[in-house]
Image (cartoon, coloured by chain):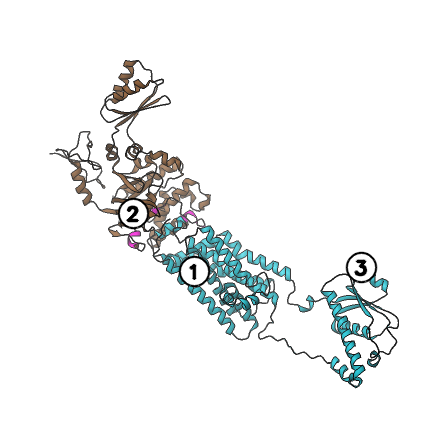
Amino acid sequence: MFFRLYRYGLIRSSRDRMMIFWNLIFPVILGSLFHVAFGNYTDKEVLFHQVPVAYVQEEGADGNFALLLEALETENGLIQVQKTSQEKAEKLLQEGEAEGIFFQKKTGAGEQSLEGLAGQENSGISLVVAEQGINQTILNSILEQYERTSATFIAIGKEHPEGIQKAAEVLEGEYSYLKEGSLGDAASNSILDYFYSLIAMDCLMGAVMGLQCAVEFKANLSALAARRMAAGVSRFRMLWPDLAAKVTLQFVYIIFSVSYLMFALDVPLGDQWGFLLLTLFSGGVLGVFLGFFIGVCGKMPYQMKEALCVTIMMVSSFFSGLMVSGIQRLIERYVPVFARINPASLITKACCSLNIYDTYGRYLENMGIMLALTAALAAGSFLIVRRERYAGI
Amino acid sequence: MTFVMAGNDRGHYCRQIFFGKIKKNKEPGSQDFPAVDGSRCWGIRVYRKECLEMAKKVVEIENLVKRYKELIALDHLNLAIEEGEVFGLLGPNGSGKTTAINCILALLHFDKGSVKVFGEEMQPDSYGSKRQIGVVLQNVAVFEELTVQENIDYFCGLYVQEKQVRKQYVEEAIEFSGLEDFRKFYPKKLSGGLLRRLNIACGIAHKPKLIIMDEPTVAVDPQSRNRILEGIQKLNRDGATIIYTSHYMEEVEQICSRIAILDKGRCVASGTKEELKSMIKMGEKIHMEAEGLAPYQIAEIKELRHVYQVDYRDGMLEIRCSGGKHNLVHILEYFGSREIGFGRVYSELPTLNDVFLEITGKDLRDHAEVK
């Protein structure tokens, strides 16, 4: 009987168009929209664009700043300098072809040397911008850094001229006390968090399937369930094949969605296929049992249970980072208990840890909590429906 | 003394009649009852009681009480349903018919009393008894995503494991319900009548011994209704015991061998159609079209022999007579002697609605129409 009822469960669920849309097509659409919104999120160089700036230098002005701008353009690729006259510079600014104008006035005659800077109090450089923004902030930072460094050298030149050479050496050397490294094959990428959350939401979509299973099982929710409960078959012999069919179909839908993300949209979700599939399967099972538990609990009408199911799904997905990047870290910091039991967060963190870490401690921790949640939901559901009679139908 | 067998012997073998002194009492089924050949029968009450005890009881409900907070849905209900009969549960909406059914199926908690099916106390896990029950609920209970054939196969498969046997049963159920041309149709494509037939097919495909039908003809066209009723009679002829609930007295009168009338959770009367009708005072109801009748004339009509109630409304006279013969003749003689003109005249025998009305003071039909 199991396989016969399982087959009918698969047939029924696969013909349910609403289920196909929400569990299969909607995640694909959402993933495509994410891809369009975030673009080439794996290419860091493409993310940053050079800042165009105009440079107007009075004749006879100090040439150190010009050297700095040239270095920033050729070595770092931070800015794109256009040396021009004042009129042309203003025109470029107005037309938006330059984000700002560096004006350098002639402040005093002197050699372009460190010693020559000692006599100068004011760099004579100003920045003119048309609006506020990140590019203008970058230009302003360049100017401020230059003026600060200049003032430092002027002060050293005045008080300890013998230390000028040493100061120059320090400025030339770049010391970084932080080094980015990855514990796994891929680096952490905040954009990928959106896709992990999308996968988690897809897994939790199984809750709607689980709820439907409960409706077809509780005699006070549907006439169909009343007929089934009046049948001469143990409840659990009818229930297991139905749940198994729902889990199977949900797993197939999730695999389809994830395959689309990985192969059609080139989202780098790692190459640990076995563990990833295990995570997806566990997530699907958790989603189905979550919906089933909501369905068998309480005396609310079906519509209220459906609303509750969707609310839990979306709230859970929201706090796993589906809509706001970084919220997971906030929740982890301020409400750690919720972070530990939020189903979507568990799935997200499990997927993420497969990609980032080279050990499985974090992964196993999340999987363990997921399985414990699933077991608790399943046990609770079965205890409720076992030998159940109703006060009213 | 002469013994006469009356009725067919399926479930009616208790109707052994002998000619002797009759004992009249007030209990249902104990009043004067005409025999098959038209003459008065004697001693039927004594034999019927003995026969009832001999007949196998499929369903026994004793002292059943079910409350929904302050509302008493079933109020010390007692019913006994014998094997092989078509037992009708008649009553207005809210009388407790569906609640009683759900208690029989162990779907509902009840506060007091007991329910036995096939001699066993009915529990949610009484799978042995449930395997012999077929259920046709008031609301259509089929899977929208499965075709007609798949639906019947699914529900039959809950009871019948062998594939070949099940296949045969499904074919017979499709043929029985006249759905041969609709095998591949989905329920949403079927009309109301066809959907009801599918609902019935799903409930009877596994050939149960006891079939419970809860208002199976609600919102069904007359053609489908007739087909359904004929099908029920065929199922009974094939050996099934049927519990049929309805608020349509015509259906119940047509197919049920024994009827219980429920009102406010209580069984107010039970017995065969004839027994129920013989319980009430009214033996005949005469309708006459007569314009301009004066109150004194109505009072005179009421004085006529066997007339116990006269209603005159909108030019229509309704005269209830308590039995006796030739009531219409007496009334026509009166009209003739007074030279009172009249139009249409017709007489009808008491219906179950009249039984309900006289017992409860309410109209069964009005209750049905209100809802």
Which tint was used for chain B?
brown
Which tint was used for chain A?
cyan
Q: Is residue B327 left or right of residue A127?
A: left
What's the CA distance linking mark 3 and mark 2?
Answer: 89 Å
Q: Amino acid at mark 3?
A: Gln
Q: Which residue is mark 2?
A: B65
Q: Amino acid at mark 2?
A: Val
Q: Nearer the viewer, mark 2 or mark 1?
A: 2
Q: Which residue is mark 1?
A: A244
Q: Which residue is mark 3?
A: A94
Percent of width and height locating residue B216: 36, 41
Do the residues indicated by labels 3 and 2 lie within the same chain of the protein?
A: no
Do the residues indicated by labels 1 and 3 lie within the same chain of the protein?
A: yes
Q: Amino acid at mark 1?
A: Ala
> CB atoms at circles 1 and 3 under 8 Å apart?
no
Q: Earlier in the sequence, mark 1 or mark 3?
A: 3
Residue situated in front as seen by the camera: B179 or A152 = A152
